[in-house]
Image (cartoon, coloured by chain):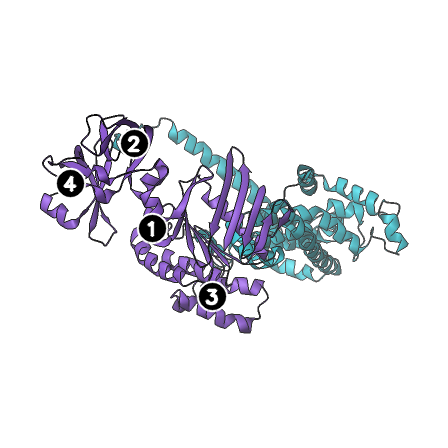
Amino acid sequence: MSGDAPPRARRPRRGGWAARVLAAAAIAIGLGFLALPFVALLSHASPAQLLARLGEPVVLDALRLSLLASGGATVLAVALGLPLAWVLATREFPGKPVVEVLVDLPMVLPPTVAGLALLMAFGRAGLAGRALSAFGVSLPFTTAGVIVAQLFMALPFFVGPARAGIASVDRRLLDAAATLRASESFTFFRVVLPLAAPSLVAGVAMSGARALGEFGATITFAGNLPGTTQTMPLAVYLAMQSDLDVAVVLSVLLLVMAFGLLLGLRSAPAGWFWNRARAQGPAR
Amino acid sequence: MLRARLARRLGAFALEAAIEVPDRTVMVLVGESGAGKTTLLRLLAGLERPDAGRIEVDGDAWFDGAAGAFVPAAERPVGYVAQDYALFPHLTAEQNVAFGLRASRVPAREAAPRVGAALERVGIAALARRRPHELSGGQQQRVALARALVLEPRLLLLDEPLSALDAQTRRAVRGELRRLLAGLPCTTVYVTHSPAEALAFGERVTVLEEGRVSQDGTREDLMRRPRSPYVAEFLGVNWFRGDLAGPDGAPAGAARVALPHGELLLSGDGASGELTAVVHPREITLALAPPAGSARNVFEGAIEELVPEPPSGDLVRVSIATTPPLIAEVTREAVATLGLAPGVRVHASFKAAGVTVVK
């Protein structure tokens, strides 16, 4: 019996302190490296100065456009991504790895490449673009184009967490639902969605933040027209060449929004989701 | 009435079983883990599709391999209580019970009284607003049962419904569950690996061994004539296998059976050759001194364990380390007068007439 074995004496670990000092240094440098640029950005101007520049038309136009486009892109990411996440989480089919790579691809692709590819597809002479222009719809250099570019880049950021959340719902609960005469769609809305809610909300936040920060695909596909396609990241880039303070105001705004989004997600009040119940799980 | 013939292959494991359960009857399905009990239940529930066979309930075919017909779980009037109950953690007890009615589009106004009645029936109406994690194991089990029963299933499937409970709760719930099942208008299949539950619940017992039905019948049939070592051991019946040596040297009217160690006397002459015999624990008498008398089998050994049987009754099951090991059933009184305790050496004896030849 293992319980009868005498406890092995703990050997004093030599050099343990050196490893600890090295680790502490690495952590300090790592965190400092992450924090310093933000500190620098925030200390560039006083809050009063920032507030004074907040009302400039360039800033307001970019803010309005960014909120509209990233909001729209996020809604579309949920609408298109949820069924996709569900299929990937619950079904096996030939060619699934290819679909998985396709879904993940925008995460690793240079955004400019994505923008160019979008242009080839939805540009006036593009594969789908010609069909669209027959209906009088043209995406490049329009706000709709911005949404398309952001959606393309943000979709994987919703599908990933959503899929993981759906897959984590206990299989036994789905079986129970089936024996309770529930159709698959009833089960999806009454069991899968509520239990996967924390992951879905995480996916919304991640894809929303990605859409908000999207730059490369937007400028390549939709251009840089103030008021129409010039979102905050684009405006930051442009303002850097003319008025650094405006660039800083926009950057701080973006920083605060992203920070708030991620922090809000993390500190959602306990029990707001079904976390508590989920941690307990079904009775063993 | 449930009638099923099922075949299902899962890797190296193959289930091939035929079962028949009359109306308003509880059939207990027993077997070791891995024997295919849960697979059989899942096939009956429609959660898995058999490779071949037929499932028929009250004359309706739920599955017909030959015709390629398969009614999925959601369309079968079946109730399924899983081993871990599988309650929806985000729903209250009440909402869990209402789930099936809502799924069948029963309007809320009509569903509410039915949910209330179902909770009342299992005795947890006061806990309707609690979530599963706020309920004890026994209470969760009742919610799961109410959730299945509220849909008035024609076939109720219970997968080890008491195994997740602690021993004390289990005893308390067992009696209630038995009364409840006895009053149900449906056919019930009850999976267990507990002999006590099998005997308490099953009017009929089906034994599954390695994916096949090794025996089925009434519990009395099984007790009297267990057809495999597993069944005998499961029910706690003593089991012998040996070669019939004929009447030479045996008392009049008896025959000798050569066992791997020692021999066994049984009444009658019987057929020659290998045979299997059982001795019910009640046939065995315990004594501290070697008993006198003719045509008795006597085995000596030390007592290993004493278990009250049934848990509250006045009989005690005594396991004795004889060769082969024996189980005797004696009264509490006998235990007290003889001073029976683990380690005490006893002589276990039974009459030749107490031996039943099975085959």
- The secondary element bearing badge 1 is classed as helix
Which is closer to the viewer, label 4 or label 3?
A: 4
Which amino acid lies under the numbered mark 1 shown in the image of this protein?
A: Leu
Q: Does label 2 lie on the same chain as label 3?
A: no
Instruction: Mark 3 and mark 1 in contact? Answer it, CB < 8 Å.
Output: no
- The residue mark sitting in front, 1 or 2, is 1
**Circle 2 residue:** A2
Q: Label 1, label 4: how many angstroms apart (C-alpha)?
A: 25 Å
Q: Are circles 4 and 3 on residues that touch, CB within 8 Å?
A: no
Disc 1: which residue = B199
Q: Residue at x 37, y 45 (%)?
A: B193
What color does chain B have in the rendering? purple
Q: What residue is disc 4 on?
A: B286
Q: How many angstroms separate mark 1 from mark 2 (CA)?
A: 38 Å
Closer to the camera in the image, B118 or A75: B118
| Horizontal arrangement in the rendering, residue A176 relative to residue B192 (left or right) | right
Between the residue at mark 4 and the residue at mark 3, the CA separation in whole angstroms equals 54 Å
User: How many residues crowd around disc 1 within 10 Å: few (fewer than 14), some, or many (20 or more)?
Assistant: some
